[in-house]
Image (tube, rainbow, N blue to C red):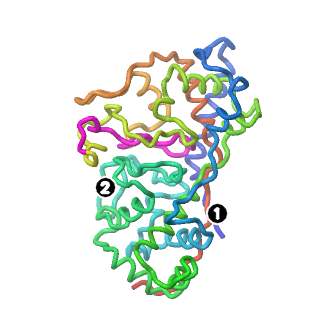
Amino acid sequence: MLRIAIATVNASIFTILFTAVFLINALLPSSACAADSEPPLQQLSASEKAAWLLPPVSYPEQNPFSAQKQELGRKLFFDPRLSGNPSRTCATCHHPGLGWADGMARAMGNQQGLGRHTPSLINIAYVHAFFWDGRASSLEDAVSQDMLSPGMFSGETARSIVVRIAAISAYRKAFSESFASEGVTFERIAAVLATFVRSIVSNPSPFDAWLEGDSGAITESAKRGFALFRGKAHCIQCHSGPAFTDSSFHNTGINSVDPGHYEISGKDKDRNTFKTPGLRDIALTPPYMHNGSKKTLVDIIDFYDRGGDTLGGGNELRPLHLSLEEKQDLLAFLLSLSGDAPETAIPALPLALLP
């Protein structure tokens, strides 16, 4: 079966960036960018190192893992009959070759453009809030909302989706085997899709290899960048834990029109706040920010260095005053968080005439 990996253009961009950082680092004096007061790797305890490594994926009690559910979810993810539109599947917006996103600044809905950037599904199993505004508290809920969203699958209802999938005998059989009882329900469709999506996990990165003891896995520049990340640059305040996200909401001032999490919580403190994205495989998923306004990681670093933007609403950031060398070190570290892109096999779909 065909294997889907990262798009060639993204891979090329990653290679160019990594090479540029390596060459720049080679030309810098060895004393450049001494990292604040953060301890070097060898002084970190085993537990501190382990805290940065991705643990095994855990599954909710109400939707435990099974290989049958994962495979069934994978088929539905790529099946246009889920949406009733022959040109639209889950992979339309979350393409494996585009970092499990779509590579565009703003998501393209069923018939019109949407207001926010499509977030990557990589490591979605490790977060605790979903969508940029946090309107779903579980992955199953997020999947359900997406299927019923007018912007995604126009005009769909839970019943119309169930009727269409249940009309395919191979799917009826697969659901019976996955749940040990007959019946295709909307909740079961969401459950198997969530089970598949939880399997989209980062491959080991150079950073992981370094944490596990390979001192040459990343450059000296990237090592200094990790210290900056934990220290002067203050990145760790929001990008914490093995997935490099606190699953919380913050205001960087990048957009004062979109209410963000305020629309969900109704609290003034949440105006214009958006969920912190994870940073693993970040080189594979441009552009960046909830509105896709930053095209490159260099743009991101410059944005945070100047203290973000204040488009009428203020923000939580403060200028960092990073030197050029420090910016290069931080970029080298961010690049070290990307390994081989998570890939999957395009499944053979059950044969049936489209309704």
Provide residue 320's location: percent of width, then percent of height: 44, 19
Looking at the rendering, the stretch of residues picked out in magenta corresponds to 266-291
Give yes or no for residue 278 being in the magenta stretch: yes
Q: Quadrant location of residue 80?
A: bottom left
**x, y percent for residue 65:** 58, 65
User: Disc 2 on helix, strand or loop?
Assistant: loop
- The residue at the point 62 percent across, 69 percent down is 67
Q: Quadrant of the C terminus?
A: bottom left
Residue depicted at x 44% and y 68%: 190
- Residue identifier under label 2: 113
**Which amino acid type corresponds to the residue marked 2 in the rendered image?**
Gly
Residue at the disc numbered 1: 3
Q: Amino acid at mark 1?
A: Arg
Q: Residue at x 39, y 79 (%)?
A: 162
Residue 179 colored in magenta in the image: no
Task: Name the side, left or right, on which 70 lies relative to 76.
Answer: right
